[in-house]
Image: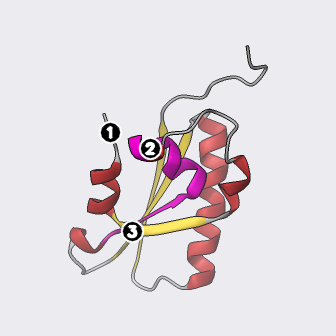
Amino acid sequence: MSTRAKKRGTAVEVKAKRDLTRSLVAEYRRQTLTERENAGAGVGVLVTWRYNHPAADAVAHVTLRDLARLSRPLRVNDGYMDEADGSWASMTLAELCALIDE
């Protein structure tokens, strides 16, 4: 049995701004990882959305580790790919939802 506690759930951080700069998105990504840990969640997702744009234009940001935990075809055991927590993938919110298996 692993000594690592299995974390469950998803922490979702939603940020809406008129101007989203790369540095601002990088800060939001750091905040998302912190919120994921504070919530004891297994997965963290950042959703960024620009004011006066359709919700369909929202962008989901997720680390490769968390993407592997969310998507059945990529599902991996806990602890595997933890090093991928520093690499992020961005996609539309609809694309992320399509990958998530209930």
| Residue positioned most to the top | 1
The residue shown at (66%, 41%) is 37
Residues at circles 2 and 1 in contact by the CB criterion of under 8 Å: yes
**Residue pictured at 63% horizontal, 58% vertical:** 31
First to last magenta residue range: 58-73
Which amino acid, by three-letter code, is at mark 3? Answer: Met
Identify the amino acid type marked 2: Leu
For the C terminus, the quadrant is top left
Q: Position of residue 66 (x, y in %)?
A: 54, 48
Residue behind mark 3: 91
Element type at mark 1: loop
Neighbor class of circle 2 (other Cα within 10 Å; few <14, some 14-19, many 20+) is many
Q: Earlier in the sequence, mark 2 or mark 3?
A: 2
Confirm whether the magenta stretch covers residue 81.
no
Q: Is residue 59 above or below residue 39?
A: below
Q: Which residue is mark 2?
A: 70
The residue drawn where x is 51% and y is 42% is: 69
Q: Amino acid at mark 1?
A: Asp
Circle 3 Cα neighbour tier, 10 Å, few/some/many (<14 / 14–19 / ≥20): some
Per the image, label 3 sits on a secondary structure element best described as: strand
Mark number displayed over residue 101 = 1
Disc on the earlier residue, 2 or 1: 2
Tell me which residue sits at (58%, 65%) in the image: 88
The answer to whether residue 71 shows anywhere in this view is: no
Q: Secondary structure at mark 2?
A: helix
CB under 8 Å between discs 1 and 3 = no
Q: Quadrant of residue 6?
A: top right
Q: Position of residue 91 (x, y in %)?
A: 39, 68
Where's residue 4, x and y in %?
A: 75, 25
Could you give the CA–CA distance between mark 2 and mark 3, rounded to whole angstroms?
Answer: 14 Å
In the image, taking residue 25 as reference, residue 96 lies left or right, namely left
Lower position in the chain sequence, tag 1 or tag 3: 3
